[in-house]
Image (spheres, grey):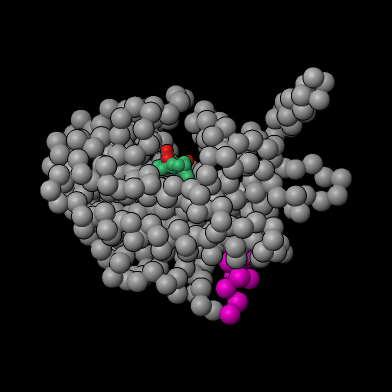
Amino acid sequence: MSTLTARPLHQFELNTLSHVPDVYAWSALNDLPYGDDVVPVVDLESPDAVGLIGRACEEWGAFQITGHGIPLHLLDRVEAQTRRLFSLPTAQKLKAARGPGRLSGYGLANTSSFYSNIFWSEGFTIVGSPHDDARKLWPEDHEEHCCVMEEYNRLIKDLSGRLLRWMMLAMGLHDEDMDWAGLLSKADPVLQLNYYPVCPEPDRAIGIAHHTDSSFITILYQSSGESGLQLVHREDAAGPARWVTVPPRRGALVVNVGDLCEIVFNGRIRSVMHRAIVNRTQTRISVAFFCGPPPEFNVAPMEKLIGPNERPAYPAMSWPEFLSLKRKLYNKTLEYLRSPEQEAEDHKNTSETTNQ
Ligand SMILES: C=C1C[C@]23C[C@H]1CC[C@H]2[C@@]12CCC[C@@](C)(C(=O)O1)[C@H]2[C@@H]3C(=O)O
Ligand SMILES: O=C(O)CCC(=O)C(=O)O
Ligand SMILES: [Fe+2]
């Protein structure tokens, strides 16, 4: 396993290939059985939205939302701008390549550096303002792109604050326990545009390998047509852990619970393992909004969720500390934080501090 570093871009133009070259071949795609259960769909205008969200978070760590107030024509424009970006010639896209140590720009998904095989996808990350990178792609003609992305960021940030507040209420907490809107207003919005070209042998490739998002929640738009997003439904009375496909639904958005919520809610809800697969017939795009905190945020379980005489299920740390741990341990991060070894380590650190 390596740490997150920039990696060379594709050696191939994926949409021209008639077979999957070995560096793109994945063997562990069927590690779990498939389930045909359906990820809950919550209408945010429904009177029991809070309860439905709470149940979906506890059972799935994910749900689709309708009635979210983001106009369909804006979603269409976001999709059109995303397709326009990825259909630029490779040389042009490389002008906005994600440089070493930078999060924003064009390249493979960052997490691809954990694997020796390459993802069948391209990514473009927008952190904060879209202007700098868009100017590199379209020196004369980036106004429309920036306008659309900024408007989307504004509405989706607002929506994420509402959703987090409802999740908190569903967990029996109250408005005074966390000012989500205030907290999120201090963070840079992060948008990840994903592009999955058609693939001649979809069973041999992966769009983005399984992972959890680090954010509080991720709000994902996926293009209609072929589905690609799959998530792990944990073992329950109905069966063992299984892959479940989240079909695109016109106008709906997918909400994924991320690692930060798992920690803040002290494990009452868990982040959802998910991946994107590819298909033979339709180019797919997705746009993920990662709802994260400002750098100074203290990542720790909320006091009220820790029972009397109970230790928090996760140790406290800063957000940059969490991200650097995640860069090292990737899918093992939360398991490590919950483990007894970590508790011992945590205890040692606390006694060192108190001994000083
Ligand atoms: C709010 C977030 C979520 C982050 C970290 C932080 C800021 C940047 C986000 C992304 C965006 C691109 C994919 C990812 C994997 C990456 O490398 O940077 C994401 C990551 C995560 O989910 O871990
Ligand atoms: O394309 C998708 O459906 C998933 C994308 C994703 O998981 C991500 O960008 O983190
Ligand atoms: Fe993701």
Residue 58: name its quadrant.
bottom right
Residue at x 30%, y 30% (from the top left corner): 99
The question of residue 17 being in magenta is answered with: no
What residue occupies the far right of the structure in this picture? 309
Is residue 36 in view?
Answer: no
Give residue 329's position: percent from left, percent from top. Answer: 54, 30
Q: Is residue 179 left or right of residue 127?
A: right
Q: Tally the marks.
A: 0
Residue 171 lies, with reference to residue 108, above or below; the image says below
- The question of residue 50 being in magenta is answered with yes
Q: Nearer the viewer, residue 242 or 103?
A: 103
Residue numbers of the magenta segment: 47-59
Horizontal and vertical percent position of residue 77? 25, 63
Residue 144 position (above or below residue 297): below
- Outermost bottom residue: 47
Residue name at image x 60 percent, y 77 percent: 48
The majority secondary structure of the magenta stretch comes to helix
The residue at 77%/27% (across/down) is 350
- The relative height of residue 140 versus residue 179 in the rendered view (above or below) is above
User: Could you tell me which quadrant the C terminus lies in?
Assistant: top right
Q: Residue at x 35, y 71 (%)?
A: 71
* Depth order, front residue of 337/159: 159
Q: x and y percent of residue 311 in the render?
A: 79, 41
Q: Position of residue 179 (x, y in %)?
A: 61, 58
